[in-house]
Image (tube, rainbow, N blue to C red):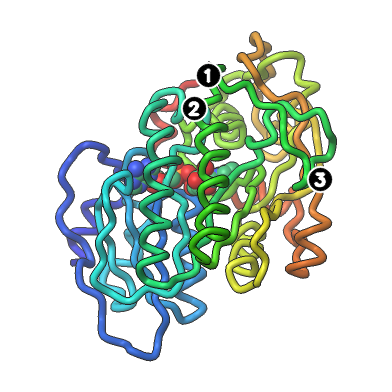
Amino acid sequence: MEKIFEKLKGNSRQGQELPLINDVMGENADKKTAVVTGGSGFLGSHLTDLLLSKGYKVIGIDNFITGNDANIAHLAGNPDYKFVRHDVTNYIYLKEDVDLIFHFASPASPIDYLEHPIPTLKVGALGTHNALGLAKAKKATILLASTSECYGDPLVHPQREDYWGNVNPIGPRGVYDEAKRFAEAITMAYHRFHGVDTKIVRIFNTFGPRMRLRDGRVVPAFIGQALTGTPLSIFGDGSQTRSFCYVSDLIDGIYRLSQSNFHEPVNIGNPGEMTIKQFAEKIIEFTGTESQISYHPLPVDDPKVRQPDISRAKAVLGWEPKVSFEEGIQKTIEFFRGHPDLATFVKK
Ligand code: NAD
């Protein structure tokens, strides 16, 4: 088993057959079982680590459309972990009892969902339907990973959960935004109509180790450019704002929500807002790169502002972020320094 994972480390292999890995889970009747769809992705793999540390058995499900097997390589041989390679837009069958489901499967970065528009719509709609069906059949709690993209290009700032958003349904980003809005709608319908115990987290930009260098999100893009001495590409004039949450804070908030009795959406993100230009300058400072900044046209429907109002998370979950931007970004830069993908990373 270890040997198989040694071979897999560092390689993402979409479309190739993987050997069955950790396909049997140990018998431990005392432990609760959690399912994580999208379990080999950036967030799904961090969530899996937290759940294992909290004493859960975990079943990860993923089809590797954007995931990376290196993210779960360290779980090889763990008797509390089982991995199932499966596309959740198809019926999900598990023989085990299940207590808690985290539905995280979905392409998540703009590059990914523009490259996979129909799988993105399908996983938001059919995948969420199947995950809810599993929750209903197993009488399990289910938590949906939704997104700040539900607010679109927001006319209310910062964004509170009772703001309904400003989304262009037919723009290129609509495949992701509307898939998640549908996912929220069907989740609430399963809660109201079938009495399923559901939770919805609206995740704001999150960063940390295990992101993919080339996933098109600004954090790995800037770090990759800085570490390879290429110019940091800003789209527009750089005055658009983003708020960045470190991954351990986000996962802590999500875990708290899963243990709560709250069924309406909850924003989890870091309200510390900065412009993209300020962010680029910080990456230049922290990496010590010689790279300059280059400016490019703004993509269609790029949100101009993005900042979570986290009053609900504070009140309901007692949660707020703890990791400073500086600490989180240093850890992320260290993860990418010397990363094998840097050798082929050139992003203009
Ligand atoms: P990711 O691409 O790293 O992970 C998503 C995982 O889902 C991948 O491993 C992918 O292979 C898998 N997947 C996609 N379609 C699937 C399918 N049909 N069947 C099985 N597996 C499938 O992205 P991430 O950043 O970890 O995002 C995880 C979730 O969080 C997504 O639902 C995303 O929309 C949401 N989210 C993330 C952020 C963020 O900042 N990272 C922000 C908002 C929302």
Q: Residue at x 44, y 27 (%)?
A: 345
- CB of mark 2 within 8 Å of CB of mark 1? yes
Which quadrant of the figure has residue 99?
bottom left
Residue closest to the eye, 51 or 328: 51
- Reply above or below: 193 against 237: below
Badge 1 or badge 3: first in the primary sequence:
1
Q: Position of residue 81 (x, y in %)?
A: 32, 71
- Seen at 36% across and 52% down, the residue is 130
Residue 174: give x, y in percent of width and height.
55, 25
Q: Nearer the viewer, mark 2 or mark 3?
A: 2
Q: Is residue 340 left or right of residue 253?
A: left
The residue indicated by pointer 1 is 172
Left or right of 322 on screen, residue 346: left
Residue 192: x %, y % from top left? 57, 59
In the rendered image, which quarter is residue 166 located in?
top right
Q: Residues within 10 Å of mark 3 (few under 14, many from 20)?
A: some
Secondary structure state at the residue bearing disc 3: loop
- Give the SS element for disc 2: helix
- Whole-angstrom CA distance, mark 2 to mark 3, is 28 Å
Residue linked to disc 2? 175
Q: Amino acid at mark 3?
A: Gly
Q: Label 3: which residue? A: 272
Give residue 48's mark.
Answer: none
User: Which part of the image, by quadrant, shows the N terminus?
Assistant: bottom left
Q: Name the residue located 41 percent from the left edge and 26 percent from the top edge.
A: 117
Label 1 vs label 3: CA separation?
28 Å
Query: Disc 1 vs disc 3: Cβ atoms closer than 8 Å?
Result: no
Pointers 2 and 3 in contact (CB under 8 A)?
Answer: no
Which residue occupies 69% across, 49% down? Answer: 245
Question: From the Cβ of disc 3, is ligand 1 less than 8 Å away?
Answer: no
Picture layout, residue 291 above or below residue 334 = above
